[in-house]
Image (tube, helix red, strand yellow):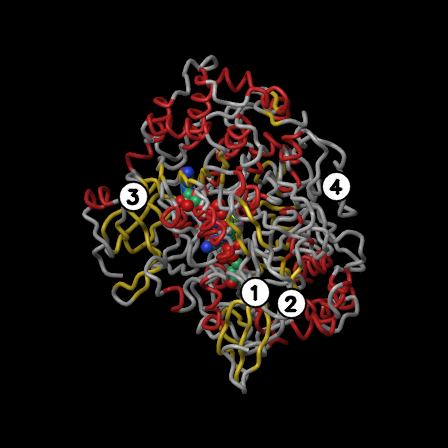
Amino acid sequence: MKYTTKDEQQYVNCTLSGPVRVFVKDKKIVRILPLEYTQEDDAKPWSITARGETFVRPNKAGIACWVQGSKQQVYSKDRLLTPLKRVDFDPNGERNPQNRGVSGYEPITWDEALSIVTNEIVRIKDENGPSAIAVTGSSHDSWGNIGYRMSALERFWNLVGCTWIDHDPDSWQGSYWGAIHAWGFHWRLGQPPAFDLLGDTFENTDMIVFWSSDPNTTSGDYAWNETDHWRFHMKKLGIKFVFIDPHCNYTSVIDGDKWIKPKPGTDTAMALAIAYTWIKEGTYDKEYIASHTVGFDKWESYLMGNEDGVAKTPEWAAEKTGVEANIIKALAREWASKRTTLAGGGRSGMGHIMRSSYGHEWSRAMVLLMGMQGLGKPGVNYYSTTGGAPADWEFFFPGYADGGISGGSAGPKDLGPRGFPKRATASQIRQRINRACLPECVISPPQTWRGVYGYYGQSAQQQLTECTFPFPGYSEIKMIYRQGASYIGTMMETNRFARMYRDPKLEFVVNQTIYNEPEAKFADIIFPVCTNFERYDIGEWAKISGYSNKLSPTNARVVVFQQKCIEPRGESKPDYQIFALLAERLGIGEMFTEGHPDEMSWIKRMYEVSDLPKVISWEKFLKKGYYIIPPKMDKKPTPALRWFYDQRPIDIPDRPMSTDRPTNATEGLSRLSTPTGKIEFESQLLKKFDPNDNERPPVPHYVPSWEGSESTEILKKYPLQLISPHPRFTFHSQHDGKTLWNDEIPHHRRLINGYRYWVIRINPADAARYGIKENDLVKVWNDRGVVLCAANVTERIREGAVHSYSSGGGYDPQGEPGNNATIDKGGTINQLTSSRFLSKNCAGMAPGSCLVEIAKWTEGV
Ligand SMILES: Nc1nc2c(c(=O)[nH]1)N[C@H]1C(S)=C(S)[C@@H](COP(=O)(O)OP(=O)(O)OC[C@H]3O[C@@H](n4cnc5c(=O)[nH]c(N)nc54)[C@H](O)[C@@H]3O)O[C@H]1N2
Ligand SMILES: Nc1nc2c(c(=O)[nH]1)N[C@H]1C(S)=C(S)[C@@H](COP(=O)(O)OP(=O)(O)OC[C@H]3O[C@@H](n4cnc5c(=O)[nH]c(N)nc54)[C@H](O)[C@@H]3O)O[C@H]1N2
Ligand SMILES: [Mo]
């Protein structure tokens, strides 16, 4: 085998950004390389021939740049190696909550740490009931179905009882609050299926409009360089790529033919003007409108200005968007004249624009534009070029959202009634919190929100229900148990979180994470967790399942036995083992483990309930470390929405709300899951719910942002629009600030006066006005926070906007944490974003709507 020397051992593992081969020498990781699929018994590569060209799937995994750097990360100086206690926290005396975030830590033994935590759990439960303990994980743990937050964390806390902190629909805000009302798919939170769209695009598409979409950076989640080859091939086939984005993003730089740069958050106006042009010029699919849609007359009436006296002409949109009317017209004409696919977001149904004020209106407008051009026709799809490769979806292996050992709750199951685990767990506590307003729930209840409660893909109606915290009969929050330590970097207006942690109402805070991260420093007790290279697990690369259904953005379905490569560093432990120890002390050890002595026997059980035993023996799987599920190439492709276009019974392996078997509840039907079964230009549900809602009316409207290019008053003080999409060189906070591997990348951080600063991008015209030059240190601020950054002066960001990646891991306050005037040196851009919800009935985060001021920073720090 390549790259080996005789005294090295090799292991296979899977990271959240790809499967790898790990080389170990003298008990230390020496190298991490992408997994190659070149063994004799590996599935042979599939190929697609279209327009006379053949594409063959690559035979090695296209992992993310930071995965190869994970060797450095394992040995990072920031690893937590022992349990820690805050020095001025005494569970039997002074707790000093006001010092969280500033006081130091001392190492304590596992025995001491577990005792303190179990005593506090028992005490707080006794005094207030279990609902006084609020629990949450981050969006993404390290890979593996057993250790994942929806698995071990949920199993443990469902048994103990707690108030779960629900994630708002951060990744798919607009799809969830908006697109669901246009085309249904509530079980996939409003995102469309992508089955077999790779082949359909190769064969039939002439042009792709990438709207708020940078798949080269975001990859449709977890799949990184897997899809780049696809787009290179599309270019070779002559498919034209148009980008609509205030930032000339990486995909655009690499593959783009045209870049259109609207003012952030104004895109719905452009969408309306495109639809207006099609109506005026008669260039839309009238037959499809008649047979596949409802409410078009209402949409037409709004566009023509019958409702508000304003026709949504390209000239009208030009004023809103800053994009010339003739460009909008030209785009509309070319779009209508070609077989055009719309790539909305880096994965179909995502995109930073839908994480901004009224983002749901954009998401609905996107569906309706496609509705006007015959969505589902060959080459006319909603598809972000990040999924839809040939795959065998009958082969069963669960994804993490299927709940692992909790038997969990994150939506339609792949797992089904296969006896895994024996006892599914569910907390008896009805009270839940929306994490977008967690600080307010803790500090200043009552708090009310709508539409975030548990797994929110049960039905479209579910999002109309209101929650008020505290729920009747339940406690306020006295303790937070936090798995992962990223929220100061990743949530909105995050000085709120620092204030929450320092509030005396919180009697006890536990953090369980891998690194000495910003949010961990607000805990009273910290449990050190090992990386995925230091424990066993099992998982399929990039497979989420549950609410993301059968989405696989990779070239191959690869199931990995995640081999432990080295012993856990220091005294760190896998999450599973920490919970097993706590459970034992709480007297529920046997309930938690179901008698399994360790993770390996859970792994074996997961192997057994999957289809793996049919194709690879347990012994061989353990030894080889992976299995590649061969696609069924003899099966006729069923491109995502072709059945709907053809008005045939649904023929894709999608599973609306099937809770028991992997079959299709709407099998035999040729309707969407909207109330009418059609694409709804006027939403029947929203019409019934609140016909007068002017923030999310039954027909999608352009609504000027509450903090954007039309906010005249705020603009006087904060004239620049900040967009903060997902970081190119790290997965959220996870690979930032821990090693030089990433921090040395000049578009990630910049070394100025011995400190590595987060980068902010500014247009040369704006930079000139402010007297800012490349690599200058700048202060970026608004009423919510002050952040120091390094300036990158670039034409790639439109004038009037500034661009900085969303979520670093380097929060470094130069004064009192939580004070909005305290300067953060670490680049925590999310101190600046607003905690205001998308719109009044849609309780999700809207980082895209954020105004700031900037100035060259000349003072020392
Ligand atoms: N490298 C990397 N990849 C990731 C992640 C990561 O952290 N790092 N995170 C993963 C996760 S959890 C998710 S949810 C997905 C998210 O995937 P997406 O939601 O698709 O990604 P974003 O980067 O938020 O936004 C995509 C593009 O929208 C553009 N944009 C911003 N504001 C506007 C606007 O007002 N109008 C228009 N037209 N465009 C705008 C941005 O410049 C960016 O190029 O990414 C996943 N992939
Ligand atoms: N401005 C702005 N903000 C955004 C967005 C945006 O577009 N713009 N997007 C939003 C979106 S879509 C998302 S998904 C969120 C993501 O926000 P988060 O989920 O908060 O981000 P991560 O950085 O992935 O957090 C993972 C945390 O878990 C820890 N961790 C990793 N593996 C393990 C493990 O195995 N065990 C334990 N115990 N800990 C582990 C990591 O060290 C880290 O602290 O950010 C949101 N924030
Ligand atoms: Mo996300």
Q: Which mark is residue 19?
A: 1
Q: Amino acid at mark 2?
A: Tyr
Q: Amino acid at mark 1?
A: Pro
Q: Quadrant of residue 334?
A: top left
* Residue 188 pos. (x, y %): 63, 42
Mark 4–mark 2 distance (CA, rounded to whole Å): 29 Å
Mark 4 and mark 2 lie on one chain; the one further toward the N terminus is 2
Mark 3 and mark 4 lie on one chain; the one further toward the N terminus is 4
Mark 3 lies on a secondary structure that is strand
User: Most extreme residue toward the front, as rendered?
Assistant: 52
Q: Which mark is residue 664?
A: 4
Quick check: 775 above or below 471?
below
Q: Are marks 2 and 1 in contact (CB under 8 Å)?
A: yes
Mark 2–mark 1 distance (CA, rounded to whole Å): 9 Å
Mark 4 lies on a secondary structure that is loop
Q: Are marks 1 and 4 in contact (CB under 8 Å)?
A: no
Quick check: 430 above or below 757?
above
* Residue 472 pos. (x, y %): 68, 41
Quick check: 668 above or below 658?
above
Q: Residue at x 42, y 21 (%)?
A: 277
In the image: residue 75, left or right of residue 407: left
Residue matched to label 3: 853
Q: Residue at x 44, y 15 (%)?
A: 305
Q: Residue at x 36, y 35 (%)?
A: 262
Q: Which mark is residue 95?
A: none
| Mark 3 Cβ and ligand 2 under 8 Å apart | no
Query: Mark 3, mark 1: which one is toward the viewer?
Result: 1
In the image: residue 235, left or right of residue 376: left
Q: Amino acid at mark 4?
A: Asn
